[in-house]
Amino acid sequence: MTSPTERLEVLTADALEKIRSAADEPGLEAVEKTVLGRKGDWAQLMRGIGALAPEERGPFGKAVNAAKEQIARLLEERREAFVGERLAQEMGDASFDPSEPAVPVATGHLHPITRVRREVEAIFLSMGFDVVDGPEVETERFNFDLLNIPPAHPARDLQDTFWLENGQVLRTHTSPVQLRAMIARGGKAPVRVIAPGRVFRNEQPDRTHEHTFHQVEGLMVDEGVSVADMKGVLGMFLSRLFGKDVEVRLRPHYFPFVEPGFELDMRPVDRKHGERDEWLEMLGCGMVHPTVLRAGGLDPERVSGFAFGMGLDRVAMMRHGIDDLRWMMSGDLRFLQQF
Ligand code: FA5
């Protein structure tokens, strides 16, 4: 019977020979598996170590390791050679031109309204507001009645409504989420939420009006919240959204669910040089009407709050100098690919 040492020499020579004569990369891989695999002759050889005298075991182990290293080196050398050959062949192929520009990878990007929405969310999150959501198909109660717009009230005509056959509506604004947020908090103050979302109005679309557009609602209720808080929060929000110092002013305006109600205008200012831009109409806002606070489960004797609603489409238009709102929901790639 051959000794383990002799067996090692035979196996090593055999492995090296097989590696040298492998014809290609797959062939080399197959050899690697049989040589270094667990089931092969090598594994058997290692099991034979027990038959050796104790003083022979150390040197034998070293010899095995050295042989394996030698095999691994040759495997690596041959692999590199094959890869080099393959690349050389591909480069030599007349149809392969390494200087040809790569096929451009078409990457998608976010819609301008989505970008504005996310910025608005980030600013309000940093001011301690939560972002909440409400249904696009609303009940008449939430879209109108509980917001202090009773059935025969002329204010219902302020917003042309899409009615569904079941008597529900496509929400005409995000204001019903004010109520849902107050109710969801069990009528407890403080409430600090914003609610961005899609809204719908049965309007003839033109450059500044769409039947489907986007608003963000805001609501802050706590003890002692005042118009000054509203002006401060909204001024800070708009400064951050537009990335410049802005001035805001309030003009009285009627919304049934707030009292007093306002429209808020803003204009960028350069305080150092005393320069001011034109006033821009930004959003509707006001102090939440006591009737609405009560509908939300809050006591208007104890708490007060402000609410606002801003059109996101118009912000995106201002930011990008878009002159016609109808592009926004058009899905037209010629428009979308500009951003
Ligand atoms: C409202 O919808 C109130 N719910 C806002 C509000 C909330 C006031 C809370 C007070 C307190 P208004 O109808 O003005 O208000 O719409 C608000 C904003 O939505 C407008 O300033 C405008 O930017 C945008 N908007 C209104 N109609 C359209 C439309 N057809 N297309 C695009 N944007 C519109």
Image (spheres, grey):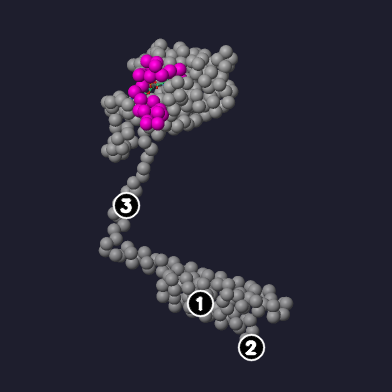
User: Between residues 174 and 151, which one lies in front from this camera angle?
Assistant: 151
Disc 1 C-beta below 8 A from ligand 1: no
Q: Name the amino acid type tagged 1.
A: Leu
Kind of element beneath mark 1 = helix
For this view, does 180 lie left or right of residue 85? right
Q: Name the amino acid type tagged 3.
A: Ala
Choose the circle earlier in sequence order: 1 or 2.
2
In the depicted structure, whether residue 95 falls above or below residue 197? below
Q: Name the amino acid type tagged 2.
A: Met
Residue beneath label 3, please?
102
Q: Using the rendered view, name the quadrant where residue 304 is placed.
A: top right
Which region shows up in magenta? 147-172
Give me the disc on residue 1: 2
User: Between residues 82 and 285, which one lies in front from this camera angle?
Assistant: 285
Q: Examine the structure image and report whether residue 103 is included in the region drawn in magenta.
A: no
Q: Residue furthest bottom?
A: 1
Choose the circle earlier in sequence order: 2 or 3.
2
Rendered location of residue 279, percent (x, y): 35, 16
Classified by dominant secondary structure, the portion drawn in magenta counts as: loop
Q: Residue at x 56, y 19 (%)?
A: 298
User: Between residues 96 and 187, which one lies in front from this camera angle?
Assistant: 187
